Every structure is written in structure tokens, then in C-alpha cells.
Image (cartoon, grey):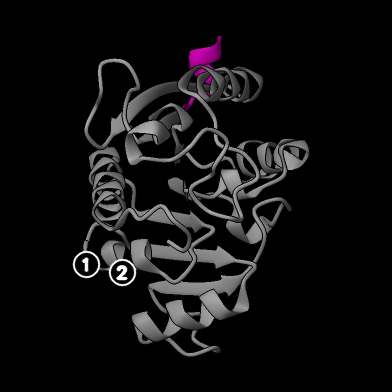
């Protein structure tokens, strides 16, 4: 990560925990929304459980890095792993029907006024069975030696407290018929919580709603 805040060990722990939770869901088809340079995709590729893995991003440089890391070429769209240009703010019928999706350290790069578009596209239209969302916990920044108001990355549009993140996640879950629970990632401080917070959304079936 660029900028003052450095988090290499936390980043590895975060990715490993996401993979662990995905494995526990028995998902076979996984979306990585905002895949960046493909670090999560590389971990997913090592797990035989995942029969289809698709990563999307709007940054062409990152997509090139991901394809290179995974040994893919631009036209390789029929293999087990696919990396393609795409936005998780827009509905895409090709991304429907997946068992699980991840948004790892991505929502904080979105202007808050556009989060409703993400909600509609991901939770409403794509509607994977399980969705994992991770984001920084701003309360923990003081333990990283950061002054008030400084963000972990210059491109972050916001960094939420635990209460604010849970308020958003519960609203999304209620509006879109998901159940949500929360996971701390990283060392947990009694006062400030953990550095990374994760929401795990599980789709509620029609029969469960009735």
C-alpha cells in the first residue's frame, strides 16, 4: 500500500482469512470484485474447491499485473480463472449466479454517494450466495501511529468506525434479504477493535423469508 501506512503482514492475514471463510462456505464459483493486481486470485487458484474464479477491476494496469501473475493472456476467457475489465457499480448479467463474491478493501475507494450503486449491482442484481466485504476500521488508526484525519491510503474516500460500518452493512442486508455477521481481522484491541473489519453476508432464500 502506498502512503505512510504500511500493512504487508495485515494484508496477507486479511487475504488468508477471506480464503478460509470462502472455503468454509463450500463455494465453487467465486467473484473477486475489485481484484487489483490479483493477490487474492492467486490464493484462490491454489484451492481446487474453486472451479470458476473471476476477477474484475476498472484499472487496466492492475488487470495487466493480475493476468501476468496468473499466467493469463488478454483473450484467455474460457479457463478456470478469468480476469476482465468491469465495474461492480454496474449490473452485469455475466456476473450473475456465482456462489460467492469478495470486496476486499474496495468500498472505501468509492465515493459514499455511489455506494447505493454498488449495493444495487452486487446485492440486488449479481446476488451471489455469500458476500465478504472488508474495510479499514478508522478507530484503530491511532494504534498505527496515524494522526486524526489521516487516511491509510490517499485514494480512500472514507474510513469508517465499527459502528458506522455495521450500520451500513445491516441496512444493506435488510434491504436485499441477506443475513450479516462481522469478523475482526488482525490483533484486537479492547478499546479500538481490530485494524480490519469484515462483514459476511449470506443470502436468505425465498423459503426462509416465508
Q: Residue at x 55, y 13 (%)?
A: 209
Foreground disc of the pair 2, 1: 2
Q: Which residue is mark 2?
A: 42
Part of the protein shown in magenta: 202-210
* Residue 131 in view (yes/no): no
Q: Which residue is mark 1?
A: 46
Secondary structure of residue under mark 2: helix
Whether residues under marks 2 and 1 lie with C-beta atoms below 8 angstroms apart, the answer is yes
Where is residue 182 shown, x and y percent of the image?
38, 24
Category of crowding for the residue at label 1, using alpha-carbon neighbours closer than 10 angstroms: few (below 14), some (14–19), many (at least 20): few
Q: Front-most of 191 and 103?
A: 191
Q: Residue at x 35, y 22 (%)?
A: 192
For residue 112, side relative to residue 64 (left or right): right
Where is residue 69 shown, x and y percent of the image?
36, 81
Q: Front-most of 189 and 147?
A: 147
Q: Residue at x 62, y 43 (%)?
A: 122
User: Is 34 located above or below residue 194 in the figure?
Assistant: below
User: Is 16 located above or below residue 148 in the figure?
Assistant: below
Amino acid at each position: 500500500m502506498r502512503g505512510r501506512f504500511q500493512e504487508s503482514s495485515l494484508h496477507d492475514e486479511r487475504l488468508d482469512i477471506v480464503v478460509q471463510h470462502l472455503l468454509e462456505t463450500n463455494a465453487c464459483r467465486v467473484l473477486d470484485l475489485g481484484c487489483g493486481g490479483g493477490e487474492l486470485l492467486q490464493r484462490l487458484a491454489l484451492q481446487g474447491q474453486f472451479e470458476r474464479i473471476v476477477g474484475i477491476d476498472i484499472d487496466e494496469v492492475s488487470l495487466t499485473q493480475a493476468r501476468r501473475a496468473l499466467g493469463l493472456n488478454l483473450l484467455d476467457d474460457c479457463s478456470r480463472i478469468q480476469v476482465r475489465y468491469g465495474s461492480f457499480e454496474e449490473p452485469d448479467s455475466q456476473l450473475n449466479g456465482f456462489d460467492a463474491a469478495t470486496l476486499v478493501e474496495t468500498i472505501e475507494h468509492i465515493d459514499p454517494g455511489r455506494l447505493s450503486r454498488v449495493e444495487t449491482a452486487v446485492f440486488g442484481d449479481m446476488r451471489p450466495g455469500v458476500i465478504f466485504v472488508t474495510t479499514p476500521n478508522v478507530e484503530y488508526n491511532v494504534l498505527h501511529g496515524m494522526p486524526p484525519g489521516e487516511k491509510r491510503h490517499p485514494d480512500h474516500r472514507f474510513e469508517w468506525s465499527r459502528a458506522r460500518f455495521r450500520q451500513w452493512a445491516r441496512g444493506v442486508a435488510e434491504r436485499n434479504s441477506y443475513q450479516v455477521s462481522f469478523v475482526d481481522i488482525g490483533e484486537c484491541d479492547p478499546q479500538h477493535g481490530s485494524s480490519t473489519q469484515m462483514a459476511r453476508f449470506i443470502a436468505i432464500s425465498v423459503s426462509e423469508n416465508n
